[in-house]
């Protein structure tokens, strides 16, 4: 009897629970090092910016350093007209650039999605500008806009315009010239994302629409666009954030000039911190830019119903 009772004795439950707890924690333990690195490289700089935004911090004038509270923010909104000028230009730059890049990117994606001879080469040529770095793109367009050897020289040879004309130094032409330069690199980004989504659209939908007598325009409006909704929303949001933070191209092309006509808020922040060494005020401006981008992104995603039904 004692031997039968010993055989029938069930194993202890607490040991099973302790043994099964380790596999559940294993994924978190594996990603912990990467999570800690990301926390260090992302959270620390962000918190540092918030901290310095409340300080008067200028290494060249240490006697003025100290706690400033919200004085930097008050100065930006009430006493710094250049802040409002750069913010307005940043909004103008983002709307124009993202709108045109989306329009041309969608058109290119629809074209290279068709079947034609040399489609692979055509796609490579369309997407190649996106592989060029921002600094190299700026250098290319600086040479193209050069008044002695660039586009204006050849136009003057054909009797269009005059010799020595510089589109980047004229307040009436600098904005369109900068827009064209950034379009050259930004359009392929939209074309790549939209083309990838286009290739997932079932051809049966278009065949059924043709049987029902739907025109190409109606097919585009009722089939293509609804399917591309999430891709368009995500690409425009990402590109808007990148264009708002665009510094390299405008800095190389115009340096924010002429007469501050092409100075964006991030470029103004860079000049304030690097040139003027006013890191406290630059941190406050960075905080304002961060809040603006966060608020606009949340509103945009909610209005567009990103991830919802198509």
Image (tube, rainbow, N blue to C red):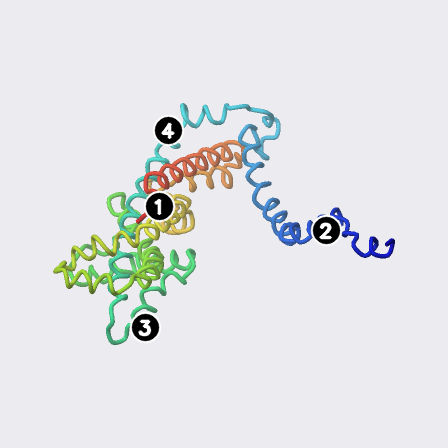
Asked if marks 1 and 2 touch (Cβ < 8 Å), the reply is no
Between 304 and 120, the one nearer to me in the picture: 304
Q: Which is closer to the viewer, label 4 or label 3?
A: 3
Give x and y (percent) for residue 305.
34, 42
**Which secondary structure, mark 3?**
helix
**Which secondary structure, mark 2?**
helix
User: Badge 4 is on which residue?
Assistant: 81
Inter-mark Cα distance, 4 to 3:
51 Å
User: Badge 2 is on which residue?
Assistant: 16
The structure residue drawn at horizontal position 39% and vertical position 48%, both measured from the top left corner, is: 238
User: Badge 3 is on which residue?
Assistant: 120
Inter-mark Cα distance, 2 to 4:
68 Å
- Of labels 4 and 1, earlier in sequence is 4
Asked if marks 1 and 3 touch (Cβ < 8 Å), the reply is no
Position of 2 with respect to 179 (left or right) is right
- Of labels 2 and 3, earlier in sequence is 2
The structure residue drawn at horizontal position 49% and vertical position 27%, both measured from the top left corner, is: 72
Instruction: Answer with the quarter of the image where residue 77 lies.
Output: top left
Give x and y (percent) for residue 1.
86, 54
């Amino acid at each position: 009897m004692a031997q039968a009772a010993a055989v029938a004795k069930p194993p202890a439950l607490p040991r099973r629970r302790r043994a099964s707890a380790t596999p559940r924690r294993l994924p978190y333990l594996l990603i912990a090092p990467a999570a800690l690195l990301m926390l260090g490289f992302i959270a620390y700089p962000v918190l540092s910016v918030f901290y310095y935004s409340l300080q008067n911090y200028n290494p060249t004038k240490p006697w003025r350093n100290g706690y400033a509270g919200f004085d930097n923010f008050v100065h930006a909104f009430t006493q710094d007209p250049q802040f409002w000028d750069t913010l307005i230009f940043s909004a103008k730059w983002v709307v124009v650039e993202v709108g045109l890049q989306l329009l041309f990117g969608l058109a290119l994606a629809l074209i290279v999605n068709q079947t034609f001879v040399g489609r692979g080469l055509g796609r490579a040529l369309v997407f190649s500008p996106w592989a060029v770095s921002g600094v190299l793109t700026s250098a290319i367009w600086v040479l193209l806009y050069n008044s002695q050897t660039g586009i204006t020289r050849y136009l003057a040879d054909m009797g269009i315009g005059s010799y020595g004309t510089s589109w980047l130094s004229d307040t009436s032409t600098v904005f369109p010239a900068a827009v064209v330069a950034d379009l050259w690199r930004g359009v392929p980004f939209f074309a790549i994302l939209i083309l990838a989504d286009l290739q997932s659209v079932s051809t049966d939908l278009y065949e059924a629409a043709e049987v029902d007598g739907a025109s190409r325009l109606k097919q585009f409006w009722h089939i293509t666009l609804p399917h591309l909704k999430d891709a368009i929303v995500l690409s425009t949001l990402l590109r808007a954030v990148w264009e708002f933070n665009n510094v390299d191209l405008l800095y190389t092309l115009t340096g924010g000039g002429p007469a501050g006509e092409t100075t964006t808020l991030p470029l103004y922040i860079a000049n304030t911190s690097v040139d003027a060494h006013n890191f406290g005020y630059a941190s406050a401006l960075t905080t304002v830019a961060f809040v603006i981008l966060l608020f606009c992104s949340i509103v945009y995603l909610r209005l567009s119903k990103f991830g919802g039904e198509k």
